[in-house]
Amino acid sequence: MKKKIKYVFLLVMISLFLFITACSNINKKTKITMYIWDKSMCKQLTPWLEEEFPDVEFVFIAGYDNIEFYESLNNRGKLPDIFTCRQFSMNDGINLSDALLDMSETELVGTFHTTFIENYRDMTGAIKWLPMCAEIDGIIANKDLFDKYNLPLPENYEQFANACKVFEENDIGAFYNDYAYDYSCLEALQGCAAAELMSRKGMDWRIKYANEQPGTPVGLDFEVWSAVLKRFENFLNDTYAGEDDIKRTFYQAKDLFLENKCAMLRGTGNDCVNLDSITDINCVMLPYYGDTSEDNWILTYPMYQIAVNKNVEQDEKKYKIIMEVLRAMFSETGQTKAATGSVVLSYNGASNLETNKCFEPLNDCIKKNHLYQRISSKEMFEISLNVAQKMIKKEYSVKDAYEDFNKQLLEKEIDIAPEIIFTQDKEYPYYESENGCQASSSVANTLRNHLGSDILITYSPFVTSSVFKGGYTLQELKWLIHQRAAIRTAEMNGSLVKETMEWLINSESDDSNPVLHRNMLPVTSGIEYTIKDKGEGRFELVSVTLNGKKIDENKQYSVVLIGDNIAIEDEAFGNCPMPEKISDIVIADTKNIDSHIDDMVLEIEKFEEPTEYLNILK
């Protein structure tokens, strides 16, 4: 009988334990790590995602807009769940392909227009990247000048070339482009020949080029690219491009446009809207023209691309939530939040983003889905600059341009494995705990010791990933610290140190909030701080301590501030500009963060241990 009672008791206890465990799992939030290409995504999109998915614990990390950065994370087995990249091409990202989730069979992919999504399909039929809303780059026109010379807005290339001729005959620059830059050369070259690049043969070549494998480069298709370069030669001649266009900056071209000395210039959709709103000039955006109105195209590029770690398939719950997060991001509201006020178009049929009146000449292209996505591999930028400038200088014929372009594509240099400069023996994770981020603390402590300061304060977590165990190259070290990190120094007494922390943490009387996200709380070295969690993403500084004791308000300390204060001062980020009494004594360091890292690697053998710099009171 006693054995039976013990047995029943044991069953009850096991059942109770399983019930409690199940309940705790039900209430446990799903953690999703998301790398963002720029802190601008923290303006509207990331706070909105937190509101839409209260049962998700998001970890948003501002990393690098660089495919090689993600390759480095993947090589260490640390690829995040979701990540974004703006500087992107399929062939640049080929080494990541096996680590990415194939989304080709998902409902989400079915909402994209076929014209656009096919640019992301690899040779196996898989789709592992999705494009966020489209930014526009093209021809901004002064409609008032067209009206003055009784010229209708062009509907095809012949009318565009004729308008250029009329303007030049009247001593007005027809079209100015800042051909000193690689992106300007690439966009004009591809934009004026979009019809050729979007032909069936053009698309076949693009798919082959996008899927080229390491060691087997893909050159130009002769038929397609002879036509592309011929179009570009005509475009340069008909827009009267010369060597002055190689020297002229965008801002110089804009000044001439504002003085009615230039009828058209290359610029973005946002440039067009801004010029229209701040001047008396009636500005409109024009497409790149083909032989007929059916061949006109708008040159676009995604605000960024999104990919998902293939490993999320192993967790069914997490996979379903991530699909819901992506659907939200690509909804009309999600894309509007991502745009943060920029004027964009959508590659996604489920969204119908509003356009500006400046874009009325583009309506026909928009209805036909004639949004050309530029080919933007690293080598395309570099080669386009080289070839375009030589064509402008009349050094290259179409034949010369084709041969040089093709040769540069085929003769790629073989990458040499970079040198390991030191080996880290411990790993410190990137996540926010009650006592701060270990990875950020480790790097902050290392930098403070290198700089020889008493105190180091960063404006927000400036570290882009965990501190990994193992060998580091110089590039990986530089990737560890955010690309916009700048260094400032000051001599402060303890009272001013406390005021600095209050500026970075406390909400203002007008309800502006410098934190926005918990993982944007300051990281400190040399001091600790305690804050009160007031709920709804708001905090209040309680105390600042040094080695556990209240900081001496009268003592002088050498202080280093690291970060990008544009992200603090911008209205969309928090609208909390640096107080004058602090900015008056802060001195900008003339050396950038990369230079300090170059010096630092000569001194250190490993990263410093992290410290518990943060205490949060509920």
Image: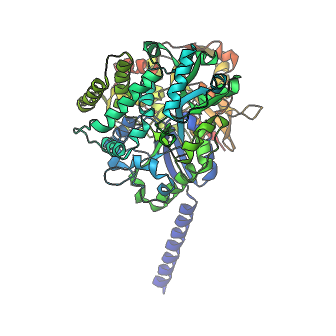
Q: Position of residue 261 (x, y in %)?
A: 60, 15
- How many labels, in total? 0
Q: Position of residue 215 (x, y in %)?
A: 22, 38
Q: Position of residue 413 (x, y in %)?
A: 24, 28
Residue at (48, 75) in percent of width and height: 10
If the image is split into quadrants, where does the C terminus sit? Answer: top right
Of residue 537 and residue 128, the one placed in the foreground of this image is 128
* Residue 455 visible in image: no
Residue at (45, 18) in percent of width and height: 241
Q: Quadrant of residue 436?
A: top right
Give the left or right position of residue 403, taking residue 441 as reference.
left
* Residue 62 visible in image: yes
Of residue 234 and residue 94, the one placed in the foreground of this image is 234
Give the left or right position of residue 156, taking residue 542 as reference.
left
Of residue 128 and residue 185, the one placed in the foreground of this image is 185
Q: Position of residue 144 (x, y in %)?
A: 66, 24
Q: Is 269 rendered above or below residue 499?
A: below
Q: Is 92 rendered above or below residue 115?
A: above
Q: Quadrant of residue 201?
A: top left
Residue at (49, 46) in percent of width and height: 33
